[in-house]
Image (cartoon, coloured by chain):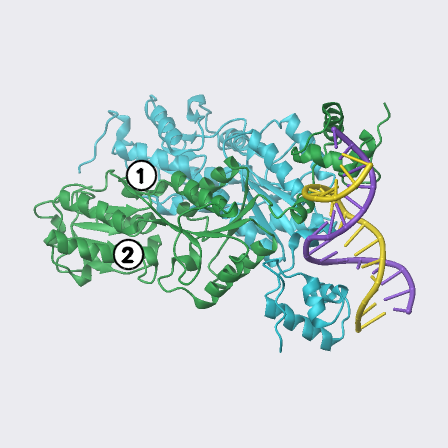
Chain colours: A cyan, B green, C yellow, D purple
Amino acid sequence: MESQRPPENRPVTIYDIAREAGVSAATVSRVLTNNANVRSEKKKKVLEIMEKHHFKPNALARGLVNTRRKVIGIIAADVRNPFYADLYVACEIAAKKAGYTAFLCNLLPDREEESRLLTMLQEQQVDAVIQFGGRVDDMVSNREYVRQVNRVTETIPMVITGKLDGSSCYMVQIDARRAMELLMRHLTGLGHDRIAVVGGLRDVLSTNEKIQEYRKLLEEYGIPYREEYIVEGTYDQKSGYACMERLLALQEPPTAVIAINDFSAAGVLRCLQDRNIRIPEDISVVSHDDTYIAEFAIPSLTSICYNYENMGRCVVETAIAAIEQKEVPRLRYLEPTLVVRESSGRVRESPCFLEGRAFRRDR
Amino acid sequence: MESQRPPENRPVTIYDIAREAGVSAATVSRVLTNNANVRSEKKKKVLEIMEKHHFKPNALARGLVNTRRKVIGIIAADVRNPFYADLYVACEIAAKKAGYTAFLCNLLPDREEESRLLTMLQEQQVDAVIQFGGRVDDMVSNREYVRQVNRVTETIPMVITGKLDGSSCYMVQIDARRAMELLMRHLTGLGHDRIAVVGGLRDVLSTNEKIQEYRKLLEEYGIPYREEYIVEGTYDQKSGYACMERLLALQEPPTAVIAINDFSAAGVLRCLQDRNIRIPEDISVVSHDDTYIAEFAIPSLTSICYNYENMGRCVVETAIAAIEQKEVPRLRYLEPTLVVRESSGRVRESPCFLEGRAFRRDR
DNA sequence: GTGAAAGCGCTAACAA
DNA sequence: TTGTTAGCGCTTTCAC
């Protein structure tokens, strides 16, 4: 059998296949899409020749014709944060299962980036956009970005894990209030009533909700609110460290600390260990996100788990339903759970660090 | 002025713009590509109308015509590992600077996935493929995968951070031998001569090289080789823990441990702390990768730093040079550096855990 | 069941 | 400087 090599290095096209199989390009296309009847004998031959030449259909050409590319664009705040990495991977797995490809873009610190990436995804004709972090986390949504999103969503559905006031995005939100409730119940159950909240910015939606809930719960539990127990910061280790230092400088430091995420909890741990304050004997530390940092930390961290797999599935399912114009709720809440580990324990009657700050345990 | 809305919800095309501006589509295209002269007056008008309609060129259509899509596909082993996340982000930044878009695909445990993703990237007509992890890390390359890669590289250049025997990929490799040399010099300089290597699989290229170099260096330093000081494992915390347990069970446990990466080092730390063995007083622990785990760990880890930013830049530059058919070396080595932190220190004359295993320090 | 032909949105000769 | 024209590789009517 004579092997008819395609000329030069030009990639093989359906026309090359068609010629060699003695059929039309349309028939080859039918075999490819598998959505029309082709005589099984011809089909077999076409498939053989495709295989022989390792034919790969050009996704751009297919996308140009179809509206559906089977690609979902994902804008993530920063995959170096395991929270986003886990979520991204969960989405990718869910997308793959549904026959879609996930296309990840990273936000990076630059705020302008967000708009640029969205434009890029739009140009790439993705079928839907998913966004975690960045402006969808803001308490008050950026007007300009909302305007852009609204233009995009005229054509492409968007799913976000936060909110964007005045947009018609689908929302899959973690129930931040519920998370705080779980932590507070856990801590008060252990006898704590001097509970501080560390890190996070008030203008971030989930942080704001957590703090609101914290105050509400204090009232419910009949614990007096102390302003100094809410120490705002950012979301990194350094900030956690600094916040904890401020708490330790108080007349009456807390006996339990709720960190806004695992990174800041790592900073809190570090700060306490540098001062030889024992965890959880002297102070309990709990946090949000349950990334592997929580597991790695020594002591391991009691943390709120969001079940990334489930969250990713929910986000992707929503996106695909929207693509296929099916009915899906505009807003879905995800139930967090509490994972209890070593860093939280019963409150001590009189924590050592109360009498004499720089308490040292024997080494 | 009458606003001529495009019919229905159909996205605006250059034809819509052309009609409204009273020019031809070619002229609009010229404005878009900005590579031909257009009377500035017309250009201005075209730009205005584009702006007015928020026109976004269809990247698929552009890609169909041009061979260049300005997209680089990245296959990463698992972005949940901060090593890959850092590297990926570094690549993304470097790509962006060069006017390219990075398109991330995650490998996940499944080996078949690798081939599927490569096919997908090929179908998506990316201009180049970068791969970290997976089969490019194997000591002995999978023949089937090499065959596929060779077909791909006929059209699309590939850059890998490992090797693929029999392929014509560009390689950017970390100098694993040099990394081991830095660690060994550091530890021997601190007086250690009972040095163990923990975790990692012998059939992984970089691990293999490290162990080879370890043995070579032992000889150079005149330290006797002990088989039991090389404890093979995987690359996670659990494995690090288990390996360390085995080392502690030895007649003469080591005084210093070289972990294969930060994850396994975290396991080693955990194991030691569970037994109240002090770091670095009783045992020094050092590791590879210098991810933030090294910084977070308590004590913080002395670790080998690969300078991700530099590595990402190098990988992307190689990819782009290959795309543009420029001359680039087929193989480049990257020089690692050593970051000394708290987990390594002078060897003790007689480590406590030598007499009586379950040594306890006072709490 | 199959082929011819039109067209997806854009770019790049080639003329004018 | 600009418009006309011909594709890029594929899918999808519409006839047959």
Q: Is residue B298 left or right of residue B108?
A: left
In the displayed structure, would residue B317 be above or below residue A56? above
Q: Amino acid at mark 1?
A: Ile
Residue A127 appears in the rendering:
no
Given residues B228 and A202, the one toward you in this image is B228
Q: Percent from the top left, x then y, of residue A270?
A: 31, 35
Residue at (27% x, 54% y) in the render: B210
Q: Is residue A236 left or right of residue A48?
A: left
Same chain? Circles 2 and 1: no
**Residue ID for mark 2:** B209
Q: Amino acid at mark 2?
A: Glu
- The answer to whether the residue labelled 2 contacts the one labelled 1, judged by CB atoms less than 8 Å apart, is no
Q: Secondary structure at mark 2?
A: helix
Given residues B44 and B53, the one toward you in this image is B44
Residue at (13% x, 48% y) in the render: B192
**Residue ID for mark 1:** A279
- Crowd tier of the residue under label 1, counting other residues whose Cα lies within 10 Å: few below 14, some 14–19, many 20 or above: many
Q: Is residue A351 left or right of residue B46?
A: left
Residue at (13% x, 60% y) in the render: B251
In the displayed structure, would residue B279 be above or below residue A148? below
Chain letter behind tag 1 = A
Q: Percent from the top left, x then y, of residue A356?
A: 24, 24
Q: Percent from the top left, x then y, of residue B9?
A: 80, 40
Q: Percent from the top left, x then y, of residue B108?
A: 48, 56
Q: Quadrant of the N terminus of chain B?
A: top right
Q: Quadrant of the C terminus of chain B?
A: top left
Residue B287 appears in the rendering:
yes
Give the Cα distance between marks 2 and 1.
41 Å
